Image (spheres, helix red, strand yellow):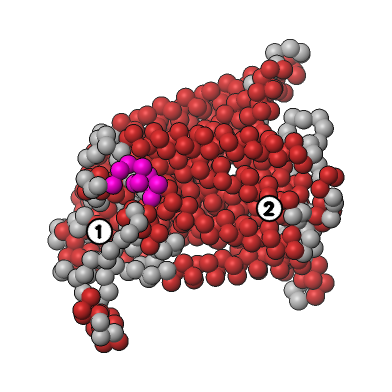
């Protein structure tokens, strides 16, 4: 009996790593600040929704109906915010979970103890996920109180939390897997986001566009009755589709399956959340098993003194081959290369845009760029089959996708510029050189712009190609050139400031994401819900005019599409939110110039504040 109790003891799964991580987390003040801010924002948001939806005038029956509507709105929005935010936080928190142990050469030492590789992986994973589980648990009392108003069944709350938890486990495990072979946190974050985007957005979009095309339906290759079960099974394992379907069924219980998924079977429910949760857990278990296997190999290599995983020096065999090919290689060994420009700028420009393992010297940049272009061409072919390339919404979607990816790159790369130097203990050495603070700042900023350049070049290529084929008006190139520089400078300056202020990469990345979340999600939501007078409406309209997503939507909706591409410049109309009449091209250009100047000024202020923080709390 005692042996059975020991067998089911959870300490056998986590080991002492879990306890150590919990003790460290309990002593960090930012975890308590995060929980307080989370509860405060939730309470403020609930109060705003309550005041905007529920009206205290009218009959009792009318007030009760509005209370049920408020309950549905609040609960669905809170759970939706949790669904996306917790996955992003899990990716960030686990981006350095294994790489820190490898870099500090403690992973090999752990293998000399009774701690197994499985306990190392599970201890790191569960200790970080526990902080997210606490955030989810904090919102349960608020969800329970709002649910009393009616309209929200307990089944939806519990099923959403289960789906949220399984999605967080999968995203966190994937981030932990990439952290084994990547030292820098931003590389892990970008790789994890890209893989999740390919699995849950790119493939479903391509499959849906292909199956809905007229060519596929008229070819008779596969009968429609056989397509529906295949698509349901395939998209049933997508957490984002599952969350959308579950929320749609809660808001409108009479919603048919075809309203959510066009290829779903008619007359019956196609979504079962326990099946989805079970699949996500199985996928996470497979990733955990792979992580355990790889961690064991890496730890054993480090324990016996083999080459480090993050070392960029080639092996002895490769050095000998390169020496045989070039007779001057032996003469140049050990010589110092002279740098005529700023050393920080030279180092940032020398690094490849996409860092591969063991110093691939830019090979992975070319491979990644080629795969991206091939994927874009494939999506263009699917859109051409569906005959939607001449619609403004299609180009708005592409432009918004490029802007979102470019924003993530700017935020992550800028927020890790200085914290990586601090974590590697190279920051005090850099400050002890003859370089001044402005040279360091400009070198880091130029490095960020250079690494983000491929994303903006892809956006430029998309616009130029469809300007040539006359699906986008040529003025769109000029309008995007007015929008992108100010937006990029603001994100880069803010990211470098948080990187100079924080000690850890995770804290800096979380801080920059929190800033953008507050500026472009929370504040617009509060202003929109609190619009009860004319002057508040004016403030809301002016604030939304500066919103990046609104600007991209207005620009592409007014300049993209077959009709707009062939119209005269003076005939183009741009519909800004809150304005009764559409604006012409020249007022739109003036508005963009004002907003760009504001973003550039804010970015420069953040950069100046970051420069002032360089020599404070160096260690």
In the rendered image, which residue does mark 1 sit on? 102
Q: Nearest the camera: 3 or 422?
A: 422
Vertical side of 432 occupied by 202: above or below: below
- Residue 28 covered by magenta stretch: no
Looking at marks 2 and 1 on the same chain, the residue that comes earlier in the sequence is marked by: 1
Which residues are the magenta region? 435-444
Q: Where residue 577 sits in the image (x, y, percent)?
A: 73, 33
Q: Is residue 169 left or right of residue 160?
A: left
Which residue is found at the position 57% from the left and 55% from the top? 456
Q: Nearest the camera: 602 or 289?
A: 602
Which residue is found at the position 34% from the left and 53% from the top? 342
Q: Main secondary structure of the magenta part?
A: helix
In the rendered image, which residue does mark 2 sit on? 477
Q: Are marks 2 and 1 in contact (CB under 8 Å)?
A: no
| Marks 2 and 1, how far apart at CA | 46 Å
**Residue 583 visible to the viewer:** yes
Q: Is residue 555 left or right of residue 453?
A: right
| Quarter of the rendering containing residue 353 | bottom left
Instruction: Tell me the SS state at disc 2.
Output: helix
Q: Residues within 10 Å of mark 2 (few under 14, many from 20)?
A: some
**Residue 162 visible to the viewer:** no
Q: Where residue 26 sits in the image (x, y, percent)?
A: 28, 35
The quadrant in which the C terminus is found is top left
Instruction: Tell me the SS state at disc 1.
Output: helix
* Numbered circle sitting on residue 243: none
Which residue is found at the position 63% from the left and 34% from the top? 594
Q: Nearer the viewer, mark 2 or mark 1?
A: 2
């Amino acid at each position: 009996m005692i042996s059975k109790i020991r067998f089911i003891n959870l300490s056998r799964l986590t080991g002492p790593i879990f306890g150590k991580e919990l003790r460290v987390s309990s002593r960090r003040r930012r975890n308590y600040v995060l929980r307080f801010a989370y509860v405060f924002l939730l309470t403020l948001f609930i109060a705003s929704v309550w005041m905007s939806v529920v009206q205290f005038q009218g009959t009792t029956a009318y007030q009760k109906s509005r209370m049920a509507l408020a309950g549905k709105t609040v609960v669905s929005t809170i759970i939706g915010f949790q669904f996306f935010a917790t996955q992003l936080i899990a990716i960030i928190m686990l981006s350095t979970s294994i790489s820190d142990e490898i870099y500090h050469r403690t992973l090999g030492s752990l293998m000399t103890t009774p701690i197994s590789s499985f306990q190392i992986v599970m201890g790191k994973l569960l200790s970080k996920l526990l902080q997210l589980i606490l955030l989810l648990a904090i919102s349960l009392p608020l969800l329970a109180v709002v649910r009393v108003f009616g309209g929200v069944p307990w089944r939806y709350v519990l099923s959403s939390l289960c789906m949220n938890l399984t999605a967080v486990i999968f995203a966190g495990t994937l981030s932990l897997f990439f952290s084994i072979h990547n030292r820098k946190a931003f590389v892990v974050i970008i790789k994890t986001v890209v893989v999740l985007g390919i699995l849950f957005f790119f493939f479903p979009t391509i499959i849906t566009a292909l199956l809905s095309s007229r060519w596929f339906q008229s070819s008779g290759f596969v009968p429609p009755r056989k397509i529906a079960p295949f698509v349901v099974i395939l998209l049933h394992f997508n957490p984002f589709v599952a969350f959308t379907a579950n929320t749609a069924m809660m808001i409108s219980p009479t919603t048919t399956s075809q309203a959510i998924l066009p290829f779903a079977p008619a007359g019956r429910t196609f979504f079962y959340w326990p099946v989805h949760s079970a699949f996500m857990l199985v996928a996470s278990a497979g990733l955990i098993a792979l992580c355990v296997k790889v961690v064991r190999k890496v730890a054993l290599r480090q324990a016996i003194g083999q080459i480090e995983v993050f070392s960029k020096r080639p092996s002895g065999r490769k050095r000998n081959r390169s020496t045989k090919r070039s007779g001057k290689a032996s003469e140049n060994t050990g010589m110092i290369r002279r740098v005529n420009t700023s050393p920080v700028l030279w180092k940032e420009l020398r690094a490849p845009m996409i860092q591969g393992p063991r110093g691939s010297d830019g090979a992975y940049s070319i491979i990644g760029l080629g795969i991206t272009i091939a994927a874009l061409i494939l999506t263009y072919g699917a859109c051409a089959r569906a005959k939607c390339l001449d619609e403004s919404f299609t180009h708005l979607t592409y432009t918004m996708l490029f802007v979102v990816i470019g924003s993530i790159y700017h935020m992550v790369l800028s927020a890790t510029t200085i914290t990586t130097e601090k974590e590697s203990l190279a920051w005090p050495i850099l400050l002890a050189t003859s370089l001044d603070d402005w040279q360091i700042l400009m070198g880091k900023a130029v490095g960020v712009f250079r690494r983000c350049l491929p994303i903006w070049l892809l956006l430029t290529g998309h616009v130029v190609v469809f300007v040539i084929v006359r699906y986008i008006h040529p003025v769109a190139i000029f309008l995007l050139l007015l929008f992108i520089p100010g937006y990029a400078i603001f994100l880069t300056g803010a990211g470098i400031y948080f990187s100079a202020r924080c000690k850890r990469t995770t804290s800096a990345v979380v801080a920059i994401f929190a800033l953008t979340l507050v500026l472009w999600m929370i504040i617009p939501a509060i202003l929109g819900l609190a619009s009860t007078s004319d002057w508040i409406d004016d403030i809301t309209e002016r604030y939304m005019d500066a919103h990046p997503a609104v600007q991209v939507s207005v620009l592409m909706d007014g300049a993209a599409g077959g009709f707009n591409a062939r119209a005269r410049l003076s005939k183009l109309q741009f519909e800004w939110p809150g304005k009764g009449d559409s604006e012409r091209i020249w007022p739109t250009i003036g508005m963009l110039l004002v907003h760009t100047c504001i973003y550039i000024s804010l970015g420069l202020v953040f950069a100046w504040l970051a420069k002032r923080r360089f020599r404070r709390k160096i260690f």
